[in-house]
Amino acid sequence: MGRNPNSAGSREDPHRGQPIKTAGAPPQVAESAVVMLHGRGSTAQSILTLIDEFLHHGVMYLAPQAARSSWYPRSGYAPLEDNEPWFSSALDHVDSALDMAADAGVPLERTMLFGFSQGGCLAGEFVARNPGRYGGLVILSGSLLGTEMSDTYEGAIDDTPVFLGCSSDDPYVPAERVRDSAHVFERLGGDVTSRLYDDLGHTINDDEIRTVNTFIEGLTE
């Protein structure tokens, strides 16, 4: 797992060498971890500001940075091959963040993946393609990717807590894709909660923040 973070990116691996920002508990005392994936046009440092809303003792927060602040260049609902090699490189970058958590002694079942917008889509795709028992998965204003919902995801996520939150009229994420994604994670054996909010737009609300807090509290119990 993982790649050399000191290597420069390339056309074949555009996110290689991008930093992984950290906050919260230092690795030597971390008991759990949250990998935070930013949206298109944002930054790792920006999404880390959210920890002011859910800072918990003993939690290490890791935020990979996307090259040019975008995990993939085209619509998430385009054919996946149209977003290569950025998409595969992005999955590898998430893998590197999980390696950092593992190197700190934090097991997968105490590691949560959290993402907003493009980052939420990436978090969901990573878990669906790398099934196991995670500490949690939170997808805000995002869904699984591709032109249509794939039935090729296999394996089991063993009651991993999963939350999908999105506006019912999100300008980028159709509500039906959120529902279909929730069904995929249910089929994979997740403990899934999905909520569609009226008039939220493409942002995060207080109810979602409370849910994230509950998920992180579950990591620290």
Image: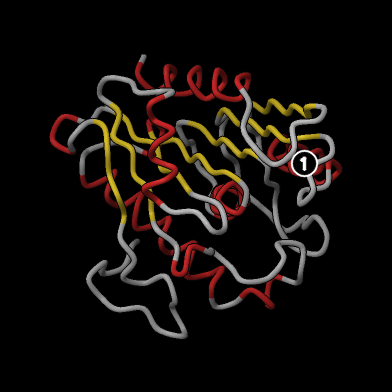
**Quarter of the C terminus within the rendering:** top left
Q: Give the left or right position of residue 158, taking residue 220 as reference.
A: right
Task: Name the residue rendered at 20%, 41% in the picture.
Answer: 104
Task: Name the residue rendered at 36%, 49% in the picture.
Answer: 98
Task: Name the residue rendered at 44%, 76% in the picture.
Answer: 14
Image coordinates for residue 163, horizontal then vertical, percent: 63, 30
Q: Along the line of sight, which residue is nearer the eye, 148 or 6?
A: 6
Q: Give the left or right position of residue 206, taking residue 38 as reference.
A: right
Image coordinates for residue 174, horizontal then vertical, percent: 83, 47
> What residue is shown with label 1?
178
Q: Is residue 29 above or below residue 45?
A: above
For badge 1, the amino acid type reads Val
**Quarter of the N terminus within the rendering:** bottom left
Dividing the picture into quadrants, the one containing residue 189 is top right
Report the residue that reaches farthest toward the bottom: 11
Report the residue that reaches farthest toward the top: 221
Colour mode of the rendering: secondary structure
Q: Give the left or right position of residue 69, taking residue 2 as reference.
A: right
Q: Is residue 102 above or below residue 112?
A: below
Image coordinates for residue 90, horizontal then vertical, percent: 49, 64
Image coordinates for residue 165, horizontal then vertical, percent: 68, 32
Number of marks drawn:
1
Q: Is residue 161 above or below residue 92?
A: above
Task: Name the residue rendered at 73%, 58% in the picture.
Answer: 152
User: Element at badge 1?
Assistant: helix
Q: Residues within 10 Å of mark 1 (few under 14, many from 20)?
A: many
